[in-house]
Amino acid sequence: MILADSPASANTSRDSSRTLPAISVRRLFKNYGKIQAVRGIDLSVARGEIFGLIGPDGAGKTTTFQILGGVMEATSGAAEVFGRSARSARAETGYLTQSFSLYPDLSVSENIRYIGDLRRVSRADIEERGNRYLSMFDMDRFKSRLAGRLSGGMKQKLSLACALVAQPQVLLLDEPTTGVDPVSRREFWDTLAHLAADGLTILVATPYLDEAERCNRVALMHLGEIRELGTPKELRHNLHATRLEVRAADLGKAEELLAAEVDRNNTITDVQRFGDRLDVMAADPDQGRTVIEDTLRSGHLTFEKITADEPTLENTFVATLRAIGQEVKSPPFPGKHPHRDLCGKVAIGANKLTKRFGSFTAVKNVSVEVEYGEIYGLLGANGAGKTTTIKMLCGLLEPTSGGMRLAGESGNLRSPSVRSRIGYMSQKFSLYDDLTIGENLDFYAGVYGVPEHEREEKKRWVMAFSGLEGKADLVTGSLPGGWKQRVAFGSAIMHEPSVLFLDEPTSGVDPLARRAFWRMINRLADAGTAILVTTHYLEEAEQCNRLGFMVAGEIVAEGTPTGVKAQQTGHLLEFVVDQPQKATDLLKTQGERWRVSLFGDRLHVITEDDVATGIRKTTEKLNAAHIAVLSARAGTFSLEDVFITVVEKARLSGKFAVED
């Protein structure tokens, strides 16, 4: 939704408003009958600030946005934009809701003109501003394309252009990048940083905590209250803990042993499993190392060197919610038919798999093998060919050429025997909205052939995993997105498949629920299930045992999360400067734009030089433009950095995604 109520006629207040907070919230309450969605929050956002609002599903974030956007009245308290009530300041506010607000049968230009007319912007200004923002977002070549034919990232860029056509002073973004690929997400956030540097105030809600790192300040909201507020650095520091990365021979057993230590002493506070490591939070790093080493040795587990790093915002998020009694629901799965005897054998195999649609080749000579007990992540930008590949691998789409193996068979992948052994959770919700949750579960139990004597226990597990105990009579279409995803996941595994395909299973799911998903995914893999998963959230991709990066229908890089990072040439440098946006713009104009990105007050630069030379050359460029470097150091590649590097280098070699 993009607000279009009042004419943009409040210019007289803009000069005086520059000294006021852009957004001021005081003792804000919102009740829905007996339910308190917002419970007396206080908030102040400065002009030109990017402020992040994070929290689990049901925290009250969207309600707060609707009040600030002027589309809903508060029960009590004040919500002001530049000193005026949020409702009377709607002309100065742009608001993007969680769902796309575009007209799919209108072109890019027609959508912008329509919104501009609603906001009573002159045709000349609509034309000038529309062209300017489409050029800024690298979308000017798509003016005539129908909005319904745009990728997720392009749709969000167009929605942003529509919101900006009235030149708002405040921009409200409610989970703007859900389902958007990493390349588009980074471009989107670089654009937001540029707009904020020009004076636009941005309040953003996001389930992706790596995005929250790009905000100037962040507030953690839970059950209608703000629990933590500060800069990302302050929130990480307030945790008073160190993150220890542990690589052990048997991660499942190591996780179990170390998780038991969380309750036994005050040294280890959290254990999280990833694809090739554990992250262990320790109040004291030296004591933490000692506890980890002693625990693993007592369990006869070998381990590699334990390395220390600073905590992430997700660590802070989880610790804060745990401190107030909020915990991840991850009840044991009532599995009766494990597949451990199959471990080591190939469950999913593709040999030079190709798919053409007319003259367009969507997938080109893809070869991949996934073993039972393995989690394989297939990563790629929108249009890279991931979903087409998955549809071929699970027998939903015939390949043009190439060979496939699935669940031990290489002939008819659509046979009943093969289908009974696979589970599939699609990118879109695979539930029937007009059925109740219970009816959906009954339907899938029947389709997948779950034995009658196991059905009630499996259904109870799905309801518990979803946090919906006693609510089986709710109509599925009434559920928020995060709850739907949990029910859809449960439906896909009730029959205990030996092969599981998950196409963006946690899109839009908050960090606590995401942990529950991955704890269950790991348990299934430990029981022998082969799992192929796609995701746009690259911190989540760390959970996979191996990764394949797709660009323009081809796999261009493959390996473990640690391995693909080690394969990268060059170095990542982190700078803190006195003029971050000016520095970002300068370095982007003097080199390849993808090598530079702004994270709040930190500047990331990828260089092919050695660390000392890269820091010296970059510092000289910045100093020549009268930009002071306050600090500079070598950083570590994140998977997002690796993804961007792999995609951009592939593009330089002539590979382009569909949307290009």
Image (cartoon, rainbow, N blue to C red):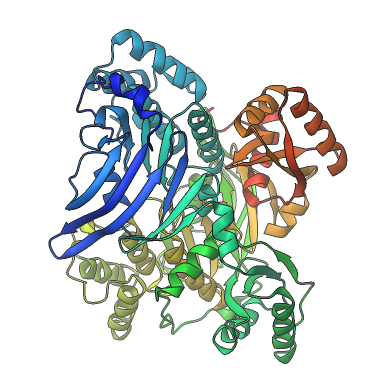
- Choose top left, top right, bottom left or bottom right for residue 328: bottom left
Using residue 88 as the reference point, say whether residue 489 is left or right of it. right
Residue 543 visible in the displayed image: no
Residue 19 visible in the displayed image: yes
- Choose top left, top right, bottom left or bottom right for residue 472: bottom left
Residue plotted at (30% across, 72% down): 445
Q: Quadrant of the N terminus?
A: top left
Residue plotted at (72% across, 66% down): 308
x, y percentage for residue 578? Answer: 66, 35
Q: Quadrant of the C terminus?
A: top right
x, y percentage for residue 564? Answer: 72, 53
Note whether 629 is above or below 367 in the view shown.
Answer: above
Which of 115 and 356 lies nearest the eye of the viewer? Answer: 115
Using residue 192 as the reference point, say whether residue 118 is left or right of it. left
Which of 588 and 338 lies nearest the eye of the viewer? Answer: 588
Note whether 40 is above or below 630 in the view shown.
Answer: below
Which of 275 and 579 lies nearest the eye of the viewer? Answer: 579
Residue plotted at (53% across, 42% down): 385
Using residue 155 as the reference point, say whether residue 316 is left or right of it. right
x, y percentage for residue 317? Answer: 49, 63
Number of numbered discs overlaid on the protein picture: 0
Residue plotted at (78% across, 44% down): 571
Note whether 447 is above or below 614 in the view shown.
Answer: below
- Choose top left, top right, bottom left or bottom right for residue 450: bottom left
Note whether 569 is above or below 107 in the view shown.
Answer: below
